[in-house]
Every structure is written in structure tokens, then in C-alpha cells.
Amino acid sequence: MTLETTIVGISVTAHTTAHADGQLNLPSGKVDAGEDVISGMIREAREEVGITLQPQEIQPVHVMHMRNPEGEARVGWFFAAKHWQGEPVNAEPHKCAGLSWHRPDQLPAHTVPYNAYGIARYFKGEPFSIHGW
């Protein structure tokens, strides 16, 4: 999920777990059983960065059919929010080293590759991409 401010910014997390260890990653996760993708994004935003989103505040901006590093097929949804309640914080310090903000055209080299690709496609106005096939 991208959190957009008047100065376009991306909130990313540096993980301290085995998954994407040391890399910058968007707040994200899997959809729980019985949960739709919008509800899942709202839950993940609350769990990972401590903000509250309303369904009307988030927009799907890109969908990616990808392969993860293990070669498994995945569908990734990218959402953007211009409004939210609360101040973004590292709500999972046991999993995340911290939060940082970056311009979408200046993402650090250690950004998770499919995140960087999806962000670039979103800002080019492309609603769909395939990555890693």
C-alpha cells in the first residue's frame, strides 16, 4: 500500500525476519480466510503501520501477476490512500526495523523488486503487469 501525501511519498518497511530481510517492502500481507482484499488491506495497515483506513479511502491502483522468489505464482494488489486516521508508526517492531518515506522515482536499491516494479507501473498509469515469469 502506498500512503500519499502532498509530497508524493511511499511508506516502506525494512523487515527483520527471514522474509525480505534487510529489504524495503510496502506494508502488505495475505488475505485471511473469509476476508476480501479491501478488508485485508485495512487490517494489514492497522497491524503493520498503526493507521485506520475506511474502505472509501483506499483505491486499487495496480494488480500484478508475479512469481515470488520461491517460484510460486501470486497475485499482488497495490492500493493507494490519500487520507487515513492516525500517524504511521512501526506497529510490528518484532518484524520490522522501521518506517521510511521515499519518492516513488527514487526508491532505494534494496527495495523488494516486485514492489519497486509495481510502484513504477502505478505511477506510469498502468493498472496491470506481469513480473517474474
Image: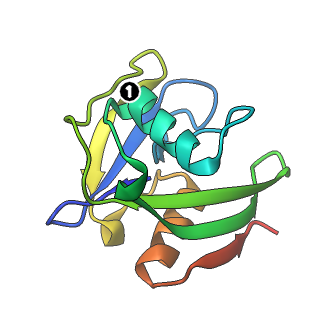
Q: Position of residue 75 (x, y in %)?
A: 73, 58
Q: Position of residue 58 (x, y in %)?
A: 40, 57
Residue 85 visible within the image: yes
**Which residue is painted at 32% across and 37% down in the image?**
52
Name the one closer to the observer, 92 or 54: 54
Disc 1 residue crowd, few under 14, some 14–19, many 20+, Cα 10 Å: some
> Quarter of the image containing the C terminus?
bottom right
Name the one closer to the observer, 57 or 113: 57
In-image side of 111 versus 31 (left or right) = left
Q: Position of residue 2 (x, y in %)?
A: 38, 56
Q: Position of residue 122 (x, y in %)?
A: 47, 75
The kind of residue on which mark 1 rests is: Ala
Residue 108 visible within the image: no
**Which residue is painted at 55% across and 33% down in the image?**
21
| Residue 108 drawn above or below residue 121 | above
**Which residue is painted at 63% across and 33% down in the image?**
19
Task: Determine the residue located farthest toward the left in the rendered image.
Answer: 6
In-image side of 11 versus 45 (left or right) = left
**Which residue is painted at 75% across and 32% down in the image?**
33
| Residue 108 drawn above or below residue 54 | below
Task: Determine the residue located farthest toward the top in the rendered image.
Answer: 94
In-image side of 9 versus 53 (left or right) = left
The residue where tag 1 is placed is 97
| Residue 130 drawn above or below residue 47 | below
**Which quarter of the figure has residue 127?**
bottom right
